[in-house]
Image: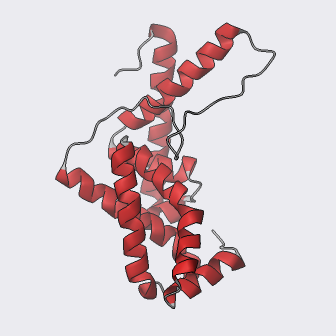
Amino acid sequence: MTLSPDVDNLIRRTRDGDLHAFHQLYDQYSKRVLNFSYRLTGSRETAEEVTQETFISVFKNMKALKDTSRFEPWLFMIARNFVYQVYRRKRLPTVSTDETDEDNREIIHLEDEDSTPEEQLLRGELQQVARQVIQSLALKYREVFVLAVLEGFSYQEVAKLVGRKPQSVKTDIHRARLMIRERLARYLREGSAES
């Protein structure tokens, strides 16, 4: 991923100790880190903790980042490491059905005016089930799926972030997609996504 010149400038200024630049970087990336952490942990409180720890670490270690174009993968690697620390410290909930955004506000979906109330209800129900299914994946699959499909990193970038070979990552993303598809199909057939 190529950084914009503005972000590159903020990184360089942050390395020089500019707190205002750091706050701007935080404003630009904190929601993505929070979403990433939430998708891996299923806990808003834990995701907020991971986000704060991540940015503290970023500020303390910014001088170690020599290539500013590697900022995003470096940032997500730090967040990932904090998520793993949390997993080692405590058991996390496996399913979250909260429907709120990063600012803890209820998410409001604009429905298609042509759809029937039944279709609108089913669409919302499927979104909730899809979130639960993703959250129920083993961390190995959930992590690479979230990074590639939901965060938009390439397979090569995901492989570097998780310290694995691109082919292994590609295989696990494919398996995650199959598991999600299978569980959603089971839900539509039987009313339950449980395996």
| Quadrant assignment for the C terminus | top left
Q: Is residue 31 above or below residue 139?
A: below
| Residue appearing at x 59%, y 78% in the figure | 69
Q: Is residue 75 above or below residue 86?
A: below
In this view, the residue in front, 59 or 190, is 59
Which image quarter: residue 119?
Answer: top right
Horizontal and vertical percent position of residue 155: 53, 58
Horizontal and vertical percent position of residue 55: 42, 69
Query: Would residue 179 be visible to someone looking at this image?
Result: no
The image's colour scheme reads: secondary structure
| Residue appearing at x 45%, y 10% in the figure | 191
In this view, the residue in front, 154 or 126, is 126
| Residue appearing at x 52%, y 65% in the figure | 157
Which image quarter: residue 121?
Answer: top right
Query: Would residue 112 be visible to someone looking at this image?
Result: yes
Q: In this view, does 77 lie above or below 87?
A: below
Horizontal and vertical percent position of residue 125: 54, 19
Horizontal and vertical percent position of residue 56: 38, 72
